[in-house]
Structures are given as C-alpha cells and as structure tokens.
Image (cartoon, helix red, strand yellow):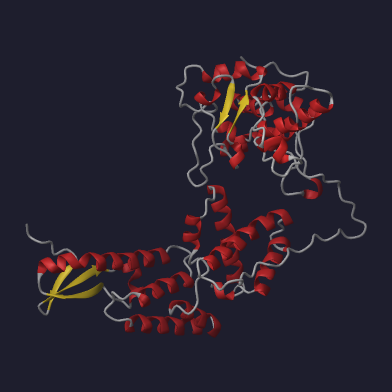
C-alpha cells in the first residue's frame, strides 16, 4: 500500500511537513500561508511515520490562534498564542515569532501606551503568565458542580474586565495584595454584592491561587487574597431601615395562599412534595418513578455528601405519587417529564424555579426589605418550613423521633451538632419508624385546597 503524502512536501530531496494556516489567523503567524517543519529524510515511509507529531503540534497552534480571534478576543489571548509559537520546538525558527511579538508590541505602544505594550511582550515571550493560564487544569482537578464552575468563571471574568478597565495587564504577576484588596472593594461597593456573596466569589479565587501554589505554578505563600472584605456601612443618620431577618420559612398564611392558588399542575405537585418532605428543589426534580417506590423517596444525588437518603412518603402525598407514577416507566422522571437538564448547568429544575418565582410574586409573597436584590422567601423556604414544623411538633410533645431524625430526613450534616459522636456516628442513622414519625408530624395548614387525585 502506497504511503500517503498528506501534509508532506518534497523540498531539496527531503520531506517536510506542511500545514495550511487559515486566512483569519495568518497575521498571527507572520503572514505565513503554511507552517513547515523539515523531517530530514528523503524516504516517504519514514517521513509518513514522523509527520504525525508535527502535524498535531501545528494544528494545536492554529486552533489556539483561531480561538484568540473570536469576537471580543483580547490582546492577551493573542499574546498567549504567540507565546505558544515562540516556545514550540517544531517551528523552523523562533526568530520570525520574536519579530512578530516585537512588531505587535510596537503597534500597541503607539495605540495603548508603553506599559501595555511591555506587558503584552512579557506575556508573549513567557516572562509573565496570563490570568487564566491554568484555569482549565484547575477545574479539571476540582470536583466542582456545574453551577460552581459557572460562578468561578463569572468571577474570573469580572476580575479580567476590572483589570482591563484599569489598563492593568491580565497576568498572575500583577495580582498583588493591594490589587486584590481593590477588587474585593469593587465587588462590595461597585457591584453591590453583600458580604456573603462576595465572600463566596473570593473563596473561588483563594482556592485557585492555593492550587497553583501546590502545583508549583506560583511561589508558596504568595496568594494575594488574604485581606478581608469591606465592612457594611451604617446607614446615614435619619434613614430608618426595615428590619431584615434574612432568609426564612414561609408563614402559615403564605403557605395557605400558595396551596390555594392555581399554578400549573406540576408546580402544584412540586409545592406539596417539597413542603411535606423537606427536599431541595433539584432533589425533587431528579426523582424518577423508581425513586418513589416502597413508600419512600430515594434521594440518590444532591448538594452534599449527606444528601443521599431515604424519606418516608407523607400519607398526604401518596395519592399524588400514585397519579404521577401511573403509565410511566421506572426510569421516567416523576415530575414534569418534559423538562430537560440544562447543558451548561446540569440543572433540571431551572425552568420550574422561574415558574414558581412568577407564581409566588403573583400572589404578593415577596420580602425585599430596604430594596434587597433577592427575596427573603424563595422555593427553599419550603425546606425551612418543613424543618420548622418538625421542630415545633417536637416542642409540642410529638413522640417517636428527635432532632437527629430531622437532620436525617433533610440530609443535613450532624457533625457540628452537640454529641455528634454519641448520637449519630455510634448508633447510625435514625430508624425508618422515627423518620416516618417526623414526616407525619408535619401537616399542611388548614383550610387548604383539596389535594388533586
């Protein structure tokens, strides 16, 4: 069988690799139409065996270059492509790349100033490291859920945008403690994030820097994210703020209005299942028909390691579960079978969350003291209500379960509770009879709309 000459050309009796550069990125390769690499042999069979490594390397360089010219691409993405080419031993010479870097830096010096041009050249020559250079490896090493990955990418984008507005190079070396402190102030003051949310985003940055130190990409103990977030300012004199107790359970009056309203059927079912099981929204939406068999909801995945659990099905929910399971396969979703898992978040309940929000606000159930961005009542308030009602039942003398049982039913960790070793680790989880007693102690407020059969 004849050897293929694809990606090969004969030059002065020796074969060399030849890969065409797309027009869109030719300017990043010094105007070259082709990338070439001599193989040092005139034997076609040997050349065919050697070409693969160089073809792959050229294609990777071209792919990175194409990624750098997408709409909105920055000069730092261009610098990263040039850096890859400058370091690549497969190129015939790094001289052309070095000339291209210097030429581009001179253009930037005229249009953006000397400091920007110098930062570009430092990145392209590998003297500094782009801000997101190790980000994908970090994400690959961490067991983040898709939503957490989105939050990480969001704060990295905020940081890059903020640095760009200040004409600060998007490199790891420029993130000093003063710069990090200014960015934390920016999150609280300019973006108006509360300290809890701002702290969540800064935690991602601290973890990223810590990982880079562990991997040897940054010096040990060099993380700049050590400062504290700005304190919340007291209101000006004469301004009276509304009391704000933070996130809370629904009141019984709110529960009655939610139960007596007229949402879509799958939202009506969802409300009752959440209120009488204490499950999180996504846990409800991931239930399949087989997970509601034998008188228990089987939660197989969730927010934390403690989320995997069995929850006795409340007597008032059994008719609903029977109706939802009818004529379905065991692998079908119990709730809203047509709802799809959103690809970039891997969350199935996203549309239901919005639909419930519209329904709740339509009933006038919303609490945003002092123009708060997010309401103190939300779908998670059903979970808070369930725990509140179970606790209140205990205080009123309910028997057959205790506070540890409540933690088992809702899937909370008990490590931080008193006597965790004695009450949780040694005896193991609560018996099913206790969990059933806990669930049955929670009752929907009356009067209520009759449960649909």
| Viewer-nearest residue: 316 or 105 | 316
Q: Up-down: is 237 above or below 265? A: below
Percent x, y of residue 182: 69, 70
Percent x, y of residue 176: 63, 74
The answer to whether residue 335 is seen in the rendering is yes
Q: Residue at x 49, y 47 (%)?
A: 344
Q: Up-down: is 119 above or below 201? A: below
- Pick the quarter of the image with the N terminus: bottom left
Q: Up-down: is 359 above or below 4? A: above
Percent x, y of residue 387: 74, 32
Q: Residue at x 74, y 19 (%)?
A: 448
- Pick the quarter of the image with the C terminus: top right
- Dividing the picture into quarters, in which one does residue 70 lie? bottom left
| Viewer-nearest residue: 389 or 324 | 389
Residue 430 shown left or right of residue 232 in the figure: left
Q: Which residue extends farthest left?
A: 1
Percent x, y of residue 221: 61, 71
Q: Residue at x 71, y 46 (%)?
A: 374
């Amino acid at each position: 069988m004849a050897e293929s000459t694809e990606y090969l050309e004969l030059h002065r009796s020796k074969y060399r690799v030849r890969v065409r550069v797309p027009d869109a990125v030719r300017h990043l390769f010094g105007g070259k139409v082709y990338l070439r690499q001599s193989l040092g042999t005139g034997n076609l069979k040997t050349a065919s065996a050697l070409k693969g490594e160089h073809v792959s390397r050229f294609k990777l360089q071209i792919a990175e270059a194409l990624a750098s010219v997408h709409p909105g691409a920055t000069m730092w993405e261009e610098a990263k492509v040039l850096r890859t080419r400058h370091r690549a031993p497969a190129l015939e010479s790094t001289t052309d790349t070095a000339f291209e870097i210097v030429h581009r830096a001179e253009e930037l010096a005229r249009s953006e100033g000397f400091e920007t041009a110098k930062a570009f050249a430092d990145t392209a020559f590998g003297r500094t490291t782009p801000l997101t250079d190790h980000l994908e490896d970090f994400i690959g090493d961490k067991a983040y859920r898709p939503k957490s990955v989105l939050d990480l990418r969001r704060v990295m984008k905020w940081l890059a945008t903020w640095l760009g507005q200040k004409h600060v190079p998007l490199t790891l070396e420029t993130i000093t403690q003063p710069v990090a402190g200014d960015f934390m102030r920016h999150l609280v003051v300019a973006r108006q994030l509360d300290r809890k949310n701002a702290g969540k985003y800064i935690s991602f940055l601290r973890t990223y820097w810590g990982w880079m130190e562990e991997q040897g990409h940054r010096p040990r103990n060099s993380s700049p994210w050590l400062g504290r977030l700005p304190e919340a300012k007291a209101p000006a004199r004469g301004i009276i703020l509304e009391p704000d107790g933070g996130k809370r359970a629904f009141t019984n009056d709110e529960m009655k209005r939610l139960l007596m309203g007229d949402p879509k059927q799958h939202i009506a079912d969802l409300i009752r299942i959440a209120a009488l099981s204490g499950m999180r929204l996504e846990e409800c939406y991931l239930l399949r028909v087989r997970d509601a068999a034998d008188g228990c909801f089987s939660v197989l995945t969730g927010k934390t390691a403690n989320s995997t659990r069995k929850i006795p099905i409340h007597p008032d929910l059994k008719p609903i579960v029977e109706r939802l399971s009818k004529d379905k396969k065991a692998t079908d979703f119990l709730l809203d079978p047509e709802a799809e898992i959103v690809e970039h978040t891997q969350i199935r309940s996203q549309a239901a969350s919005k639909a419930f929000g519209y329904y709740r606000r339509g009933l006038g159930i919303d609490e945003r003291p002092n123009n708060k961005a997010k309401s103190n009542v939300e779908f998670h308030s059903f979970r808070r209500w369930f725990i509140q009602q179970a606790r209140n039942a205990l205080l009123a003398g309910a028997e057959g379960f205790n506070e540890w049982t409540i933690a088992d039913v809702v899937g909370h960790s008990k490590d931080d509770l008193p006597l965790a070793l004695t009450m949780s680790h040694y005896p193991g989880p609560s018996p099913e009879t206790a969990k059933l007693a806990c669930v049955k102690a929670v009752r929907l407020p009356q009067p209520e709309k009759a449960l649909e059969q």
